[in-house]
Image (cartoon, helix red, strand yellow):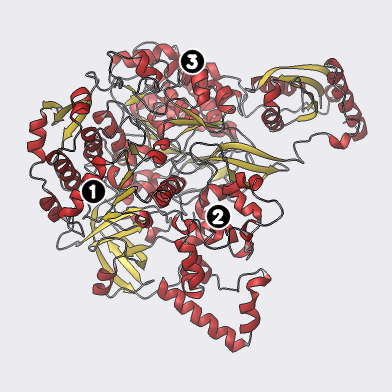
């Protein structure tokens, strides 16, 4: 399961509402925030594809000015790919 | 419905007297639970029985702003499984959240807003 | 898999790397990290139930909802909730929730759980084969005033632009179509001119055909408060039934069902006779109309027309307790108050003369100039939370496209086709089947596949047994999207489990033209999905099976978007930015970004974000308050009636006579039957019936009988009474109540139990203009069957 570190930029006035909205997204943990509107978050997903989708979802939040990954650890997913008896799982929605 | 509630009340009182439980059950108002009713009788709306069993209280509620606005018993007191004689301030907060900050924090709402007319003392 | 201690280490590293980038000092203690699972959070949204549009906050702890509370700053409810708004969170984790797609090929078979992949394929296969064999008009979508706007908009786009059918309808046909017709023909534009802000400024309330205390409780609270704080404010309540609303009335006018047209015309006559009309307002802004062709009439012709409706004659027609002096008094109060607000609901709309009844109320406001100013409005109360926003505004009825565009006008179809990037001429020119015709077509077998979304017509249609025959047939493939099983899912081939309110994101538009956003706050149970995802995935398969790239084009802008937020937002953006641009319901300023920042929401028109953030248009058509009144202004007058339906830009006063309901009492069926809701239950009780507090308040449908009638028939409270019409019969416990007028009974319609389902008894005749059925009036026999019996509540 990939783990990412992200900086999410919002308007300082929106801090409380934005925090609530971000926490509603699965896989988001908020580790810190400052008065300039920077939120430090840790993102955890099942696959890297999902990580990318989560980041997109965060960027789509109305109060988010910008979100970017500063760190990504994929050692889990790499291990799973190498192991021929397991396949990476991902929730894509049926049939897509 | 008035007829049903009256019938129920009388049979309940008869039952309680017969079993000698009248005093403790009628005093159970303060113990927290609603006196036990059959499942069938639980389908009678609160205010229909209470118009007979606690008429002054019912009238006080019915004539109050809560009564006119149809804020019903179960909104503050819960239903049978969740019944509480004395509601929590959080129950009031469903509609009166803004007053939670404006009013004194050290007493429950009903000390000043006396049930069931709720006029401020 | 990574060991937990290593995982924590990696997470800390991730956090520190991000923090160092922005120069932030992180707390060292891991326990102070904000974790979604452990905090109590309150999520803002709109109430799921009625058309008031109360703003609520859902309390969530550990991902589990535990309470609802009101939003104090919201201009709809100011923090107040009714018991339904307080308790509907209990539907969210309910054990009866549908969690997996269910399918059966024939309706006699048991349902089997299937995958989403299979389910969507079956839905696409059955619809596309019907279209291939019989054309677009062999399929239909029947939606709801409880769907999110994004859902209604996307489905109707797929039906019209994709499957080339205007068979797009919704249950607001059963409740609001006459109000739409009334607004369109009286004001030239749908929906109220004013809104709730007028309540606190009104000096006279005229509440007719509405039990506001039970159907719109939180609005009633505002009226009650206005009246109790200002005793000189007059409240007139006109209703064949004395209800909880009557408690605050200065005058209750109780009239025989269907005679209110006479009452309203008589009030108009008094106003003219006593010179209480506003000649200047009439001169500047109004014309008179009559007949099907909307022929012009003069003021004198109008006066002549209402001349027979003397207060004495009307009192006689109305019967009940009304006197001629009552009529004069209320007419004077109405006309002379500093601001009069009329409010009405199903008593006026669910009528064979529904549009006319709406017109006659608007007439009074136009005649007296009780419009446009503070505290004066002609405020039709919308029953459902999103009949306005989704169905009336975003193209959810068979004859209108998004943005209040009549489908019959080629120019309007072309505008929509261009916005959608599909070939001109793609959308059919004819309106589709309206609701009653649609279910008649299902009976006939000419409609082969219906998608029923978030509503239960098997119980909510008038004369429901007749239409259930068609629904039961294997000739009609039925898909139901819902959260619980209902009487309608009993006729489905395919049941798709949907996300409930707060389990998905989207907009509701309430009674007062206010669009408000609810964001997803919790996960849907099991495999339940939001409808916008379901519709998109279905459309992609339809495109393949029909080999039609235009269908794919309809959902292409939404392909691949994350379903919880990005997808509904994209749909909302397309609808507001492209389809409402320049229309009278311009919502371009009401983006998710704007809506997300507000305690409540935006009243259209609101073309810019700046204007939207303030709340939008409080009064339509008023220069300075309505940006379109300014931009559409044609002269120096302060009011500009730019509504799309009146080219002459005038308000129309209609000459409408008293006309009989479809079925009135006679020797064989001597009682009036009326039906309606009560406060604790919503519609067909699939939601409220599963909440113990609400269920126990009214566990069954009751028949209310006037004490005088009860005495004559030997009926005591709780007795079992048969209510029988030419169409069907119910057996109901009696409430003997000084409510319905003598000669009338009133039955609650929420009960799912077959012997207590009153729509078996009601009549399916409808208003010829609006196609809305006359639920409120038919003729029945009443007979005592037995004393009280122990009854059990019933849920499918």
Q: Are marks 3 and 1 in contact (CB under 8 Å)?
A: no
- The mark lying in front, picked from 3 and 1, is 1
Q: Nearer the viewer, mark 2 or mark 1?
A: 1
Q: Residue at x 70, y 31 (%)?
A: A16
**Mark on residue C644?**
none
The residue carrying pointer 1 sits among few (fewer than 14), some (14 to 19) or many (20 or more) residues within 10 Å by Cα, namely many
Calculate the distance from the C-alpha at mark 2 to the C-alpha at mark 1: 41 Å
- In this rendered view, identify the residue nearer to me: C559 or C403: C403
For label 3, the residue is C553
Which chain is indicated by disc 3?
A: C
Q: What x and y, as percent, mark residue C518?
A: 56, 34
The x and y percentages for residue A27 are 75, 30
Is residue B45 visible from the viewing direction of this image? no
What is the x, y in percent for residue C555? Answer: 51, 19
Q: Answer above or below: position of C737 versus A12.
A: below
Q: Is residue C93 visible?
A: yes
Mark 2 or 3: the one toward you: 2
**Residue under disc 2 on the same chain as residue under disc 3:** yes
Tell me if C499 is positioned left or right of A41 in this view.
left
**Disc 3 or 1, which lies upstream in sequence?**
1
Name the secondary structure under disc 1.
helix
Circle 2 residue: C691
Res A94 → quadrant: top right
What residue is disc 1 on?
Answer: C330
The residue tagged with tag 3: helix, strand or loop?
helix
Relative to C144, does residue C399 appear above or below in the rendering? above
Gap in Å between the C-alphas at discs 2 and 3? 43 Å
User: SS of the residue at dot 2?
Assistant: loop
Foreground: C539 or C723? C723
Labels 2 and 1 share a subunit: yes
């Amino acid at each position: 399961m990939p783990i990412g570190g992200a900086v999410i930029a919002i308007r300082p006035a929106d801090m409380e509402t934005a925090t609530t909205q971000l926490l509603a997204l699965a896989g988001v943990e908020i580790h810190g925030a400052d008065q300039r509107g920077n939120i430090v978050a840790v993102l955890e997903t099942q696959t890297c594809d999902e990580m990318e989708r989560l980041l997109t979802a965060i960027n789509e939040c109305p109060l988010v000015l910008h979100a970017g990954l500063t760190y990504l650890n994929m050692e889990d997913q790499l291990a799973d790919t190498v192991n021929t008896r397991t396949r990476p799982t991902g929730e894509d929605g049926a049939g897509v | 419905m008035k007829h049903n509630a009256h019938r129920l009340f009388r049979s309940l009182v008869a039952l309680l007297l017969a079993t000698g439980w009248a005093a403790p059950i009628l005093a159970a108002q303060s113990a927290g639970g609603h006196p036990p009713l059959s499942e069938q009788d639980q389908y009678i709306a609160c205010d229909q029985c209470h118009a007979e069993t606690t008429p002054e209280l019912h009238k006080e509620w019915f004539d109050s702003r809560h009564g006119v606005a149809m804020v019903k018993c179960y909104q503050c007191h819960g239903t049978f499984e969740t019944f509480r004689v004395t509601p929590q301030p959080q129950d009031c907060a469903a509609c009166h959240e803004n007053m939670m900050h404006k009013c004194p924090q050290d007493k429950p709402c009903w000390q000043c807003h006396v049930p069931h007319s709720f006029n401020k003392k | 898999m990574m060991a937990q201690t290593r995982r924590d280490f990696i997470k800390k590293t991730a956090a520190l790397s991000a923090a160092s980038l922005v120069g932030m000092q992180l707390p060292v203690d891991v326990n102070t990290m904000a974790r979604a699972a452990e905090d109590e959070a309150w999520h803002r949204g709109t109430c799921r139930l009625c058309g008031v549009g109360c703003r609520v906050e859902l309390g969530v702890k550990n991902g589990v909802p535990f309470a609802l509370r009101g939003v104090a700053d919201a201009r709809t409810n100011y923090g107040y909730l009714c018991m339904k708004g307080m308790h509907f969170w209990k539907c969210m984790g309910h054990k009866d929730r549908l969690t997996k797609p269910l399918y059966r090929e024939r309706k006699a078979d048991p349902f089997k759980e299937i995958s989403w992949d299979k389910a969507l394929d079956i839905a696409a296969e059955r619809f596309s084969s019907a279209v291939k064999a019989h054309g677009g008009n062999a399929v239909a979508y029947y939606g709801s005033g409880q769907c999110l706007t994004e859902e209604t908009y996307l489905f109707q786009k797929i039906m019209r632009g994709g499957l080339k059918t205007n068979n797009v309808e919704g249950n607001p046909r059963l409740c609001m179509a006459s109000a739409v017709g009334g607004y369109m023909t009286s004001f030239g534009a749908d929906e109220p001119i004013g809104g709730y802000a007028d309540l606190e400024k009104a000096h006279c309330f005229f509440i007719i055909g509405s039990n506001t205390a039970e159907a719109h409780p939180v609005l009633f609270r505002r009226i009650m408060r206005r009246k109790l704080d200002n005793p000189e404010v007059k409240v007139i309540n006109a209703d064949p039934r004395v209800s909880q609303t009557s408690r605050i009335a200065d005058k209750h006018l109780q009239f025989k069902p269907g005679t209110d047209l006479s009452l309203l015309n008589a009030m108009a006559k008094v106003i003219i006779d006593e010179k209480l009309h506003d000649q200047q307002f009439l001169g500047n802004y109004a014309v008179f109309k009559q007949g099907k062709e909307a022929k012009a009439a003069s003021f004198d012709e109008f006066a002549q027309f209402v001349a027979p409706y003397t207060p004495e004659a009307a009192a006689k027609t109305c019967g009940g307790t009304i006197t001629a002096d009552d009529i004069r008094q209320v007419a004077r109060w109405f006309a002379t108050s500093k601001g009069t607000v009329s409010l009405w609901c199903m008593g006026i709309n669910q009528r064979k003369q529904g549009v006319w009844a709406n017109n006659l109320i608007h007439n009074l406001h136009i005649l007296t100039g009780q419009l446009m100013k503070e505290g004066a409005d002609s405020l039709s109360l919308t029953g459902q939370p999103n009949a306005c926003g989704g169905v009336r505004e975003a193209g959810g009825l068979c004859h209108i496209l998004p943005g209040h565009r009549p489908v019959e006008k080629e120019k309007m179809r072309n505008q929509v086709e261009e916005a959608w990037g599909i070939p001109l001429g793609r959308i059919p020119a004819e309106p589709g089947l309206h609701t009653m015709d649609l279910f008649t077509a299902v009976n006939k077998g000419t409609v082969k596949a219906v998608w029923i979304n978030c509503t239960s017509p098997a119980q909510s249609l008038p004369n429901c047994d007749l239409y259930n025959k068609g629904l039961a047939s294997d000739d009609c493939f039925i898909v139901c999207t819902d959260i619980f099983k209902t009487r309608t899912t009993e006729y489905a081939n395919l049941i798709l489990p949907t996300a409930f309110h707060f389990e998905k994101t989207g907009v509701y538009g309430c009674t007062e033209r206010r669009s408000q956003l609810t964001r997803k706050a919790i996960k849907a149970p099991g495999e339940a999905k939001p409808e916008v995802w379901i519709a998109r995935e279905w459309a992609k398969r339809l495109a393949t099976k029909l080999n039609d790239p235009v269908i794919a084009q309809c959902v292409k802008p939404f392909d691949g978007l994350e379903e919880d937020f990005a997808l509904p937002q994209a749909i909302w953006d397309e609808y507001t930015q492209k389809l409402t641009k320049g229309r009278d319901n311009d919502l371009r300023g009401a983006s998710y970004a704007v809506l997300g920042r507000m305690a409540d929401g935006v009243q259209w028109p609101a073309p810019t974000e700046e204007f939207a953030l303030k709340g939008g248009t409080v009064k339509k058509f008023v220069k300075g308050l309505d940006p379109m009144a300014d931009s559409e202004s044609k002269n120096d007058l302060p009011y500009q009636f730019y509504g799309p339906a009146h080219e002459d830009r005038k308000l129309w006063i209609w000459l409408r006579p008293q006309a009989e309901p479809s079925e009135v009492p006679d020797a064989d069926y001597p009682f009036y039957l009326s039906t309606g809701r009560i406060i604790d239950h919503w519609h067909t009780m699939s939601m409220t019936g599963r909440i113990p507090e609400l269920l126990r308040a009214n566990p069954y449908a009751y028949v209310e009988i006037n004490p005088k009638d009860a005495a004559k028939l030997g009926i005591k409270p709780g007795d079992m009474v048969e209510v029988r019409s030419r169409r069907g019969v119910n057996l109901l416990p009696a409430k003997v109540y000084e409510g319905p007028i003598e000669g009338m009974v009133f039955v609650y319609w929420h009960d799912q139990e077959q012997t207590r389902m009153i729509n078996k008894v009601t009549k399916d005749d409808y208003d010829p203009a609006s196609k809305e059925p006359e639920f409120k009036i038919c003729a029945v026999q009443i007979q005592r069957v037995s004393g009280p019996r122990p009854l059990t509540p019933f849920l499918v």
